[in-house]
Image (cartoon, coloured by chain):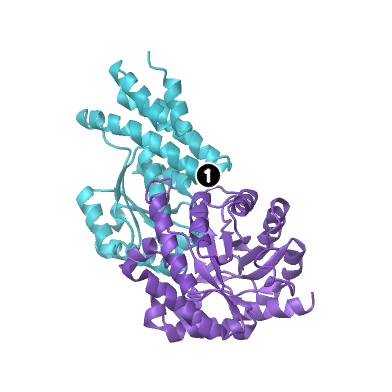
Amino acid sequence: MADLQKLYDAVLNGDQKTAVAVTQEALAEGFDPMELITKHMVPAMDEVGRRFECEEYFVPELLLSARAMKGALELLRPLLAASGAEPVGRVVIGTVKGDLHDIGKNLVASMLEGGGFEVIDLGADVAPERFIEAVREKNARIVALSALLTVTMPSMRKTIEALEQAGVRSDVKVMVGGAPVTAQFAAEIGADGYGENATAAVALARKFAQAG
Amino acid sequence: MGRLEEWIAGGVVITDGAWGTRLQELGLEPGALPDAWNLERPDRVEQVAREYVEAGSEVILTNTFRSNRITLAGAGLEGRAAEINAAGVAISRRAAAGRARVAASIGPSGKMLMAGEVTPAELHAAFLEQAGALAAAGADALLIETMSDLEEARIALSAARTTGLPVIVSFAFDTGRNRDRTMMGVTPEQAAAEMAAGGADAVGANCGAGIDRFVPLCARMRAVCSLPLWIKANAGLPEWRDGRAFYSAAPGDFAAYLAPLKEAGAAFVGGCCGTTPAFIRALAAARESL
């Protein structure tokens, strides 16, 4: 009998090997894939987020937990797709034009995947047109923009303006983040939300997905 | 006796302030790689360096923060790493003209080791190449700065030490309610102890927070190691007006922290984001009245 507490612990402790092994065992025993995610893995990621907020966990721990979650999800995704289950939401993410930094963006992308989102990662130095294309092609409802440099933050505004001009702005929620970005700046450029860190970004994306 | 003993024999040493923002005022495109200007606009880079020497900097850095081949690859310049680093040192040495020493800047790769974005061997090779080029061009010391990951800092330190130059390692404590952890969760105690054990000639903190936060950081590093401490603080936190960043601290307020920093063990003091030659003049004046 698969011990599902172990799945929760493995995600919380960033132990990918155990997370994958317990998931395999549970699937062999006929557990519902969706239930493994919602009852065991997502609560573990929530606890990871709580520990991050309390400064018990830092970026390395987030990365390890996201990796454990991802390993288990890779086993579950084909089964979910076959049963017609949709992801929590689709997010197009990228670092804006002129900015080559991708550490923060990659971290948010991993955490979103860990949170059950389908993530379309466009990389760094992404032109506004590429965000528009991806939103249209993938039918994404959330756009996440990252910038590390104060000097590339205006590219966030330009990307939002381009979404507007392309007529897709009202179809998506735009969230922004990155070291120099503030809630004030997010409001000023007309973004729908600001994530102070990777776990806040996941919470925000969930809010958008539920509202949508 | 440490190898930087002679540098600090006369008391607290004033270093320099921010370069990137000044280079933008001189025409560097927002988002463009500042280091490329070592080849394209050496005159303008030298102007920034000279402004700091004239303001009273006794140690200036080089415009080579992003000049490791991993970061340069983002701009397609990885094949020119040696050239860009050598030019950066030559520019700073010309500006210093014997009036200031040159600590050559080595920044992080921008890739995360533990996420598998880069391997330890790739990092070591990139830092070895950069450190070698900086040393060959005549840098007086190497400064590994704005580090967040202990492992990457260790790798950079071991690469830099092969040059035989003094090596300073500085971390960015920008995370947590008290801004006393790096993004990767490293504490000032861990950073100082690990770098001392790894053979660093000085350790320190730069960027991340306003100068008030650096007094406790300094004291905490001093508690676990006896190396000279290197401090470069931001001019407060950025505020946004009309899409531009403004830093809140005034030069005089900034320089008022020189005495408490010295008290807490700082041997080198300068500025990071948002600071200008006016901040360096204020620090130099404050030192006169220590």
Q: Which residue sits at x=39%, y=63%?
A: B71
Give the residue displayed 43% in from the left and 66% down from the top: B130
* Image quarter in which the C terminus of chain B is found: bottom right
| Towards the viewer: B25 or B262 | B262
Rendered position, B280 above or below B183: below
- Residue B97 locus on image (x, y percent): 56, 86
Residue farthest to the right?
B289
Instruction: Residue B49 in the image: state x and y as whole percent.
Output: 53, 81
* Residue A145, quarter of the rendered image: bottom left
* Disc 1 packing (10 Å; few <14; some 14–19; many ≥20): many
Q: Toward the viewer: B50 or A24?
A: B50
Q: Is residue A70 left or right of residue B151?
A: left
For the residue marked with disc 1, what is the amino acid?
Phe
Q: Nearer the viewer, residue B263 or A179?
A: B263
Residue located beneath label 1 in the image: A58
Quadrant position of the N terminus of chain B in the picture: bottom right
Name the image quarter holding residue A11.
top left
Furthest residue in direction top, as rendered:
A1
Whole-percent x and y of residue B264? 74, 60
Q: Nearer the viewer, residue A121 or B230?
A: B230
What is the chain identity of the residue bearing mark 1?
A
Q: Is residue B205 left or right of residue A118?
A: right
Visible residue check, residue A105: no
| Dot 1: element | loop
Colour used to depict chain B in the structure image: purple
> Is any part of residue B269 visible from this angle?
yes
Name the colour assigned to chain A in the rendering.
cyan
From this view, report whether residue B112 is shown above or below residue B245.
Answer: above
Q: Is residue A45 left or right of residue B219?
A: left
Residue A144 x, y percent position in the rendering: 36, 53
